[in-house]
Image (cartoon, rainbow, N blue to C red):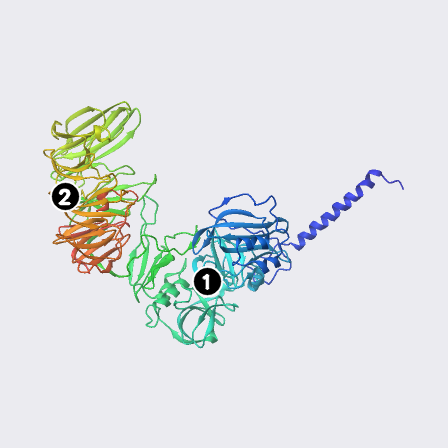
Amino acid sequence: MQIDGGNQMNKPVWRYLFMLLLTVLFAGCTNAPNKDASSSSAEPSAPTNLELKEIALPITTASSPSQSSNKFAGISYDTIKAELSLAMSAEDARKAFGDVYETETSSLYWNAEWVPMDTWTYSDTAKDASLRLYWSPSGSLSYAVSYDRDAQGYKRSYIPAVGAIRTPSSSEDNKLASKYGIRVGQKIKTKKYALGYDLIGSAQPSFGYMADPRREVTITALTKEFVEVNDDGVTAWVPTWYFTQEAPQAQDIPPTGLSIKEVNGAKWYPAAVDDAIKLEAGERVYALRSYGDWYGIAVPDRAGRPNLGLVWVNKNQVEENGKVSSLYDDSIATPQIIASAVRSELRFGLTQKRAEQVFGKPDFLETSDNIAEPGKLKTLKIWRYEKKSTELTITWSDKGELLAYRYRDETIPDGFGIDQTYSTEEPTRFHKAGELEKGKPLVTSRSIDFKWRVRTELPYNYLVGTIGSTLLVAGEDNGFSGMHEASHLYGLDRNTGKRLWKYDFGHEIHLYAYSEESETIVFYKQLESGPAYSKHRLLAIDTKTGNSKWEKTFRVEGGIWEYGYAAADKVVAISYVTGDEGRKTTHIEARDIRTGRLLWSKSYQGEGNLITQNGDRPYLLLQTGTQLLADAKLTALNPLDGKPKWKTEERLAVNEWDPHLTVDRRFPNGQPVGYWTKSVDSLILTDAVTGKTKLALPILFDDGTHYDGIDERYLFKQQSNDGVALYDSKDITSALIDARTGKTLWAVKGKADRGIVEGRRIYFRLDGKPAAANISAGKVIWQTAVPAFGMLRPFGGKLLVEEVADVYTVSKTNGSIDSRLLDVRVGYHEVTPSDQVYGSLTVLGGDLYVGSSNGFFGKVSLSGIR
């Protein structure tokens, strides 16, 4: 037989390709895809090649390998089990595993915080194996985990004893995970809401995460009872059972009192191997869930015992004491039981019916902060419980499903909960108390009877002035950094709260001036702006009715650099600067505020602007020159003809943003009369009529001296003594200054501000905490332990103290905090001008005007706070 030489040569090649194909097919069979973890079937018949999704660490700085190779150098799983221990030093690690590893600066999610770590990674890509060692800044080994493939080809994890993982554990130890095909590297969802714990940060499990069945997570490790998950960078350990088909079969039941028959252990889930905690004989617990022969129970917190969520006991371990109407209504249920039930029961999507079944009817209903985007207002309903020395608030969606909650009691003063979470876009973490929450008092709520209360279209509302019987209320949307959409000024009837008118500034700054005598307010608005020309509008309205009195539109050729707006007597004026960088001109136009008739117009070489003021001043005040004191000049102009009345050289007017003075400008009759100005080294009160100096107060250095206006008689002076700016200084002295003479009446160590005088006593903040002192001697009578963020207002026999978002009532006698105002939420937006800072709570004519951060504004009489 003739054999072709070419074919003869190709036979080995075809044989090789045929054998390779068989090998690939065989490999495909032995590495068949794993059954879905949601399946209730047992172990799949063939292993799978599941790739591990490495944890995405937020801080990672790559570095070069210590040597050119990064192989494991033949280190086996058995070697790691025998050698790996958190007690080992860096030198021990090198001896055990070699010195061929990659290093990087990363971070470890530890006790709900990202902690910086130096990470060593040993790896053998051929075996798909790796070992990660996490070294703390002090050089100790904080955590370690190894990965490889087991005999069946599954990804395997191994973790040494660390924290609450008391014995070394491998993914092979988790029999429940093996039964349901739950493997390292899978993306998976829990079948039921469940708490996630930190098991590595301390010897006791610490809750800090809630597994949400709506969110997919990646399994990064397994131990005997737990699944470690990575949820978009947040890691936590969740009991394995909640990933199985068994978990949804557990039934919610009414709270049922149980007594433990004898010393025994509660499990992480039904039929788990390890105990979660020990239970004492006779201990009172409450069942909230039932599954076959098991109860899911809330166990009271106590010293030495971790604060856990739901744990499980066999029904033969307990004696039933009967169902209770609710935990808050049960006389035996302690705050520690309430805390445990809150962790066990409250979760996204919980219904109001179930919450009422477990905790009872709320003591109070409140309105939440605004949750809508800037320019819009939307609030939610809050249930508030205040029994058994606890505080529980639950925020509900429009559908009556739980969106957020917060719990506190005397043993957990800063509390825990899920705050500001209105979607499933991020992992559910239990938030610690923020700076504004920390240390808040645990007090009961005090109801308020409003004479009237209105709702506006914007969340933040402040009283910024009055014109006769009309209240001027500023509305803000809290938009910031380019997202500001809306600002309003409302005119409300002082007696009824009826809205008389509204002016919409849009996202522009507020420019308006008014004459109380003429009951007229004039708004300025820029309609068009460009390099060639700009168009502007003046609109005057009657403050009693909102009816238009007059309107003027005018055009300015060329661009405008800056503009100012002011009123004096019965005149309103606008200033604007035109020209180029080297040659600027300031223009002023003055009109009769009642009719809009042009009274006069003038132009001045150089740049300048009118100082903002209302019609209570006799003259208009023009600031000219640059912001440098050397060429700054103030000129008082007769509002009727524009003629100068007086001038000052090297003087700047002090505006509301000035770092040297804070003063309530809303009601001029409550402050020293005149213009606040400043020279290079002094804060100067200038007589409005004559221009002469009425009071000169020293400024020792910029940012080191600040004056805080109290009333027409007193100011506080705050002085840094260490040459550092006040906001960084550790050595501050405050003095009470007589505004008539400039003399120091007394001084106190620390920063004193927000003062208000009532009789012979002055209330103020001292280093942020409310205090009271004798006005004549300055001796501090009392000081609260709790800081105040906003203003202090004596009213109705109490001192009202603004926090964010609560308002507290404080005893004038001893400074004790005895209550909070029910359904009153105050706050400040990103750049809050001083008239709004002062405007959340205002006492006028014996009544209290209450603004808010959630769309309300109201009036309360002396008898209205019950």
Tag 2, which secondary structure?
loop
Picture disc at residue 683 = none
Quarter-wise, where is residue 648 in the image? top left
The vertical placement of 43 against 777, above or below, is: below
Q: Name the residue at the left extreme.
A: 690
The vertical placement of 687 against 125, above or below, is: above
Picture disc at residue 671 = 2
Is label 2 in contact with label 1 (beta carbons under 8 Å)? Answer: no
Question: Residue 747, position in %: x, y?
Answer: 18, 49
Indicate the quadrant containing the N terminus: top left, top right, bottom left or bottom right: top right
Q: For mark 1, does the 10 Å Cα neighbourhood hold few (<14), some (14 to 19), or many (20 or more) residues? A: some
Tag count: 2
Quarter-wise, where is residue 600 in the image? top left
Question: Residue 207, position in %: x, y?
Answer: 43, 60
The residue type indicated by label 1 comes to Ala
Q: Is residue 348 or residue 260 the one in the foreground?
A: 260
Tag 1, which secondary structure?
loop
Residue at image mark 1: 203
Relative to residue 233, is residue 470 drawn left or right? left
Q: Is residue 447 visible?
A: yes
Question: Residue 661, position in %: x, y?
Answer: 21, 41
Q: Residue at x 30, y 38 (%)?
A: 507
Indicate the quadrant containing the C terminus: top left, top right, bottom left or bottom right: bottom left
Q: Is residue 496 visible?
A: no
The residue type indicated by label 2 comes to Gln
